[in-house]
Image (spheres, rainbow, N blue to C red):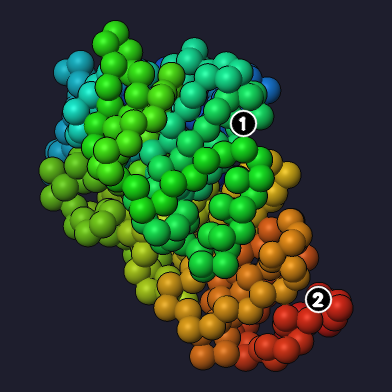
Amino acid sequence: MHQTCIIIGASHAAAQLAPSLRQEGWEGDIIVIGDEETVPYHRPPLSKTYLLAEKSVDDLLIRPAAIYTKNAISFKLGQRVSAVDPVGKTVTLDGGETLGYDKLAICTGARVRKVSLPGSDLPGVHYLRTLKDVDGIRERTGPDKHAVIVGGGYIGLETAAALRKIGMQVTVLEMAPRVLARVTAPEVSAFFQRIHAAEGVTIRTGTLVSGFEGGTQVTSVLCSDGSRLPADLVIVGIGVIPNTELATAAGLAVDNGILVDELAHTSDPHIVAAGDCTNHPSELYGRLRLESVPNASEQAKTAAATICGKCKPYQALPWFWSDQYDLKLQIAGLNRGYDQVVIRGDINHSRSFAVFYLQAGKVIAADCINRPQEFMLSKRLIASGTVVNIEQLADDDIEVKALMPA
């Protein structure tokens, strides 16, 4: 019997799930529905090479359009799904069209968290998540113009680095006492603040934004301490919210993401989910929701196998990356609950080191700056659960391969 699988969201997860379905043996129709006008593209370069116009839209495509054609994957772009009916096994588009499915995959990702402050709707106040967002930002960039970035997370710092490269005057405002406060140790925060200051970025921590001023466009940012910063461009980067509304309305279990098991099953046997919108189990870290390209891709492979009746549990180790200036930050694992930090290399004077996060003598995460070997080491140590020799781990004179677990 001919079957149909519908994928909601033309995301990183969808770009992997659709062709993986064919690889796993799905012979029916595959329809991907996305609210943007283009097939899935890489989002990480948006705050870097695409913002700097060093890459085009075609350069960002996760897969060439020809791959989807070859695999008989069809798209409905520029359209939103307004409702899912798990009983009737249909989805309804915002234009009124109804499509039936045998299997459904929800890959709706996440959206930017917005601010509701005086002047937040002024032209020139931007968010950074989509191609359209960055196209709007690029119209306001230029040497010696003033950019204010609200939020000192990875997106904020990556964008600051890119804007400095084209000669903009950049100020980063962070409400926490330090940048990257939720994701790194104080030593790593201090390192990034030092690097950005050396590159000409002004970072103000412990600073709350109270509003934006301007007439036909934003001209300044107001802070709660009464200070006023000139701004030709404002970029707000204060996190994202998982897109779970469709799942909730359809009666699926949701708790900080669509709840799935290790096979990407939702609470409905005919519906899977993958990517930033999901909350999944992890043997190492318990339940978690990840905003990560590797997570979206690997979980999508599992979801495709599940749709095809195969059992390929998702057990990948979380990992992430960030590019700023000449710095390649590679992150392995999650550092929540760490009780000790071990630093390998000179964090105070160099641009190459690794920070290991330990819990009860075992490595649970690592931040590796221009240290690809230590990144591989950290993944091995986390997976093995080895109790490490702290003195050896910190000794930069000992070769990395000598520290690898057996």
Residue at the spot x=55%, y=36% of the render? 160
Q: Which mark is residue 298?
A: none
Residue type of the residue flagged with mark 1:
Arg
Tell me where residue 104 sits by quadrant.
top left
Residue 263 falls in image quadrant: bottom left
Q: Amino acid at mark 2?
A: Asp
Extreme residue toward the top, this view: 216
Circle 2: element type: loop
Nearest to the observer: residue 140 or residue 392: 140
Please state which of residues 112 and 59 is positioned toward the viewer in this rendering.
Answer: 112
The residue tagged 1 is 164
Can you say which quadrant of the picture contains the C terminus? bottom right
Quickly name the residue at label 2.
Answer: 396
> Mark 2 or 1, which is nearer the eye?
1
Q: Quadrant of residue 329?
A: bottom right
- Residue 283 vs 349, above or below: the answer is below
* Mark 1 surroundings within 10 Å by alpha-carbon count, few (fewer than 14), some (14 through 19), many (20 or more): many
At horizontal 35% and vertical 44% (from top left) the residue drawn is 238
| Category of crowding for the residue at label 2, using alpha-carbon neighbours closer than 10 angstroms: few (below 14), some (14–19), many (at least 20) | some
The residue closer to the viewer here, 128 or 141, is 141
Q: Position of residue 285 (x, y in %)?
A: 43, 74
Q: Secondary structure at mark 1?
A: helix
* Residue 345, placed above or below residue 140: below
